[in-house]
């Protein structure tokens, strides 16, 4: 009996020794910064960075395979913290928010039949493309709402998904979940959007929706920044060129273009501070600023559209917001 116990003990000792040797021989060195970086990340595992989760992203960040700005929900604060740990420059993190390109509530875009299946947009899309007459319309069954880890998107009484811009982190979970592909991410500082993805001609659009884009090109012709182009018969706004001046929204005959800016202001030049560099006049898209070089410039309030381009261009901060601009006034002919 004693011999058997001794043999088993010896075998156990040999096995333990073997495991100890194996653990030393095959151990993988883990950079302590990985755990530190992972602790900074939000931990929502949304996948917006392109990696399987926050742990995988942390390893990629430490390995130099991903930039400090890779965590979209984390934004600039997380990017700076990661850069500080890694000893690199954070770079610029551009905050993005989701936009639902549809405003066809039932009154404007009626259903063609009643859907009685699983309350999920992906399931409904498999049944003849969904219940709406418009094949590009939001079905309002809440798939995007359920996948959002930040409670930033909800289906309203109008059966259209609406994004809470304050809560949205631009993770893109809703973008991937929408079977109609009508949600995308845009820079958060852009506030004017085309709320339609139907590329067909106006007659075909109005047959299924009264608030869709009909391809009339009025917005394209009105935009002073050349930020709008036509994709087939659908208006597209280039966020890199758009300044959110909102002129396009004022001429859209169906009201499809949303303008989220509540108040715009006419530019006002402090003549005592103006150095007459002419930069403001050069960037004004409607020629509302005039003046000789090295002399104070003036703003024509009847032409100013409140786009704020001159405020950003002025090197001496001599231009400020003036009186509120009422649409219908101050728009260039």
Image (spheres, helix red, strand yellow):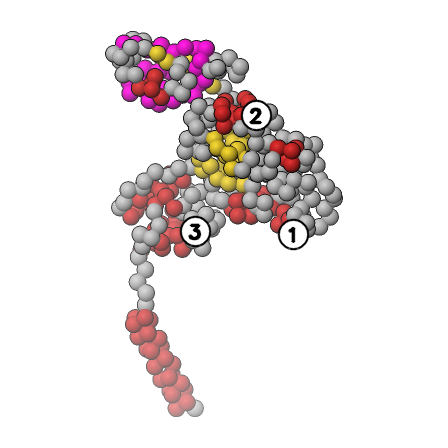
Towards the viewer: 301 or 226: 226
Q: Earlier in the sequence, mark 1 or mark 2?
A: 1
- Which is nearer the N-term, disc 2 or disc 3? 3
Query: Element type at marker 3?
Result: loop
Q: Nearer the viewer, residue 19 or 192?
A: 192
Q: Is residue 301 magenta?
A: yes
Magenta residues, start to end: 295-320
State how far apart marks 1 and 2 are (Cα): 33 Å
- x and y percent of residue 271 in the render? 31, 9
Q: What label sits on residue 126 in the rendered view?
A: 1
Q: Where is residue 88 in the image (x, y as percent from the top left)?
A: 27, 45
Give the camera-side residue of 224 and 26.
Answer: 224
Q: How crowded is mark 2: few (under 14 residues within 10 Å), some or many (20 or more)?
A: many
State the quadrant of the N terminus.
bottom left
Q: Main secondary structure of the magenta part?
A: loop
Q: Can residue 100 be seen in this view?
A: no
Residue visible at 63% across and 30% down?
211
Residue 85: where, in percent of width, then height?
30, 47
Relative to 88, 170 lies left or right: right
| CB under 8 Å between discs 1 and 2 | no
Q: Name the residue under label 3.
A: 50
Quadrant of the rendered image containing residue 316? top left
- Whether the residues at callouts 1 and 3 have beta carbons within 8 Å, the answer is no
């Amino acid at each position: 009996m004693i011999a058997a116990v001794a043999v088993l003990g010896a075998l156990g000792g040999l096995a333990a020794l073997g495991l100890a040797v194996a653990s030393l021989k095959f151990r993988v060195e883990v950079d302590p910064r990985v755990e530190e970086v992972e602790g900074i990340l939000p931990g929502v595992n949304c996948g917006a960075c392109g990696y399987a989760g926050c742990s995988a992203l942390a390893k990629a960040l430490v390995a130099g395979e991903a930039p400090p700005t890779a965590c979209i929900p984390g934004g600039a604060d997380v990017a700076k913290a990661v850069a500080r740990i890694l000893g690199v420059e954070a770079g610029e993190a551009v905050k993005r928010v989701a936009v639902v390109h549809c405003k066809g509530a039932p009154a404007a875009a009626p259903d063609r039949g009643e859907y009685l299946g699983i309350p999920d947009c992906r399931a409904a899309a498999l049944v003849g493309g969904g219940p709406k007459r418009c094949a590009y319309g939001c079905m309002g069954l809440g798939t995007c709402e359920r996948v959002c880890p930040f409670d930033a998107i909800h289906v309203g009484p109008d059966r259209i998904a609406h994004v809470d811009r304050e809560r949205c982190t631009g993770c893109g979970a809703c973008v991937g979940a929408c079977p109609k592909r009508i949600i995308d991410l845009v820079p958060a500082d852009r506030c004017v959007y085309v709320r339609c993805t139907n590329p067909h001609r106006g007659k075909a659009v109005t047959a299924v929706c009264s608030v869709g884009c009909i391809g009339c090109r009025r917005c394209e012709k009105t935009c002073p920044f050349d930020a709008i182009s036509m994709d087939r018969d659908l208006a597209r706004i280039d966020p890199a060129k758009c300044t959110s001046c909102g002129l396009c929204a004022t001429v859209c005959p169906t009201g499809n273009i949303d303008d989220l800016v509540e108040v715009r202001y006419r530019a006002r030049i402090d003549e005592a501070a103006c150095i007459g560099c002419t930069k403001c006049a050069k960037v004004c898209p409607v020629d509302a600023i005039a003046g000789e070089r090295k002399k104070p410039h003036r703003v024509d309030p009847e032409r100013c559209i409140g786009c704020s381009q001159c405020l950003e261009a002025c090197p001496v901060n001599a231009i400020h917001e003036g009186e509120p601009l009422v649409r219908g006034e101050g728009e260039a002919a």
